[in-house]
Image (spheres, rainbow, N blue to C red):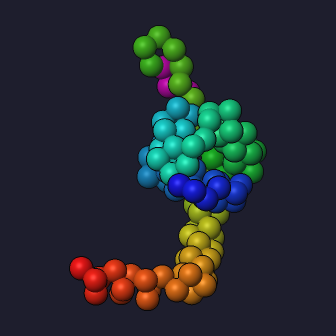
């Protein structure tokens, strides 16, 4: 992706992933990397902030003799995710208008 993720959008992505299933840091990083090149050192402060803001909770689970820290979404986190989803739709619609993507999509379909 050629666009950078700003903090609120990164928060929304993390909350969206954890809303689907509890996850640990490495898997979260891998899923976010499907969108943008991000390191674990960038993601862990996001996880700490979301935990501090009561959007995520943590628990440890043993795996191959070690503990993995899993992140789970809280009710407050779900509310924040809903807010981000509504804001994203508005933002996307506004950007689509500026880029006039509907006409470009139609041109592509017509040329096929």
- The answer to which of 30 and 62 lies nearer the viewer is 30
The quadrant where residue 86 appears: bottom right
- Judge whether 71 appears above or below 84 on screen: above
Residue at far left of view: 112
Q: Which residue corresponds to the image point at 51% horizontal and 43% vertical from the top-left? A: 33
- The answer to which of 23 and 112 lies nearer the viewer is 112
Q: Which residue corresponds to the image point at 56% horizontal and 81% vertical from the top-left? A: 99
Q: Which residue corresponds to the image point at 44% horizontal and 19% vertical from the top-left? A: 63
Percent coordinates x, y for residue 29 in the rendering = 54, 38
For residue 81, side relative to residue 44 (left or right): left
Quadrant into which the C terminus falls = bottom left
Is residue 86 shown to the viewer in this render? no
The quadrant where residue 57 appears: top right
Confirm whether the magenta stretch covers residue 60: yes
For residue 72, side relative to residue 56 (left or right): left
Confirm whether the magenta stretch covers residue 50: no
- Judge whether 67 appears above or below 2 on screen: above
For residue 112, side relative to residue 47 (left or right): left
Q: Which residue corresponds to the image point at 74% horizontal and 45% vertical from the top-left? A: 49
Region rendered in magenta? 58-62
- The answer to which of 57 and 85 lies nearer the viewer is 85
């Amino acid at each position: 992706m050629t666009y950078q993720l700003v903090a609120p959008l990164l928060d929304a992505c993390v909350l969206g992933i954890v809303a689907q299933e509890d996850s640990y840091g490495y898997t979260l990083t891998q899923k976010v990397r499907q969108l943008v090149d991000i390191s674990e050192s960038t993601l862990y402060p996001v996880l700490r902030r979301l935990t501090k803001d009561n959007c995520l909770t943590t628990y440890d689970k043993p795996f191959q003799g070690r503990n993995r820290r899993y992140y789970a979404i809280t009710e407050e986190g779900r509310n924040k995710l809903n807010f981000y989803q509504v804001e994203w739709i508005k933002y996307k619609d506004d950007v689509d208008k500026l880029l006039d993507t509907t006409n470009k999509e139609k041109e592509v379909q017509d040329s096929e």
